[in-house]
Image (cartoon, helix red, strand yellow):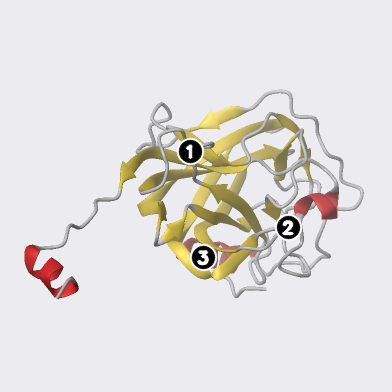
Amino acid sequence: MRFPRYGWVVIALLVATGSHDAAARGRAPGVPSYPVTKMSHTIPNGVDGTLPVCQLGVTGGFGSSEPVLDFDPVDGDYFYTWLNLDSLNCTQCGLGTYGQLTAAHVALFFPTAPETAVVGISVVGIVQTTCRFQDPNIVYCAGFDYLINWQDAQLANDFAIPFPEECKLEITALGSGQAFLETNFKYSSLMAPADRPQIVTQASVIRCQTYNPITFPQEDWVDTFGVGNPIIYADVQKCFHVPTLRKSWGQLKQIYR
C-alpha cells in the first residue's frame, strides 16, 4: 500500500475529529446499496462543461451505489481507473498528439447530509500486461486534494474536479496515451458506515478497467465486488499535435558525413 500524501485540509480535519476507526476494508456489512435513477452534476468555476472533446475512464449509465468507501486517512482508500487516449475514444486524437486533461470526475451517492469530504487526485503510470494495472511510482500529473461539500441526502452527484496544473497524455515516442487516474478518498465528516458517501457504479461490468487494491495491486474491482465499475473519469479538453523538431542543415551534414 502506498504512503498517503497528506494535504493541509486533511490534517486540520483529522485533528478536529480524532483518529480513524480501522475497520475491515470492503463492502460495509449490513449497509444497503441504493438504486441510482438520476444524477446531478457539480461543475466548479474554471471548468467549462461544454468543452471536452472526449472523456476517458468509466462514464457508463449509472446503476447503483456501493457502500465500499472507508475514507482511511492512514492507509488511504485508493481507486485506479484506466485512461486510454486513442482515436477510438477521442476522434481528434491520434499518433503524434497529446490530450489536455482539465478535470477528473467522481460520482457519489449521499445516504445522509450535510457532508464534507476530501478526495485526492493524481494521474499515474501503467504496467502493460495482458490485464494492465497501475504503477503509482510513475506520476504523470502531480497529486492534489479537493474539498467536497454537499447538503442534500438521498441524492447522487457527479463532481467535476479541476486539475490545478497542466495535465496531459501523449501518444508519441514519449508516451502510449495510457495511464491510470488515481482517486484517494481521504476524509469524510460522516464516518458511520451507514452514513458516509457511497461510490456510484455503472450498470455494465468491465474487467481490467478499475482497481481497488485492498490486498494486492492487481485487485480488479469486478472480481472483488461483482458489480459495475465505479463512475470515475477525466475530461479531455482538446487534442494538440506535438510539434516535430526539424534538424538544421549542419545537423544533417553530421549524420551523412
Image point (36%, 49%), residue name: 96
Q: Amino acid at mark 1?
A: Ser
- Residue 12 - label: 3
Q: Is residue 27 above or below residue 255?
A: above
Q: CA distance from mark 2 to mark 3?
A: 19 Å
Foreground label between 1 and 3? 1
Image point (65%, 56%), residue name: 79
Q: Amino acid at mark 3?
A: Ala
Q: Are marks 1 and 2 in contact (CB under 8 Å)?
A: no
Q: Residues within 10 Å of mark 1 (few under 14, many from 20)?
A: few
Left or right, 119 with respect to 238, comes to right
Label 1 residue SS: loop
Is residue 118 visible in the rendered image? The answer is yes
**Residue 112, quarter of picture:** top right
Give the residue number, with chain letter if any, for mark 1.
87
Q: Is residue 144 above or below residue 215?
A: above
Label 3 residue SS: helix
Q: Are marks 2 and 3 in contact (CB under 8 Å)?
A: no
For marks 1 and 2 on the same chain, the one whose residue lies earlier in the sequence: 2
x then y, percent, for residue 210: 69, 51
Q: Is residue 30 above or below residue 139?
A: above
Give the residue number, with chain letter if any, for mark 2.
70
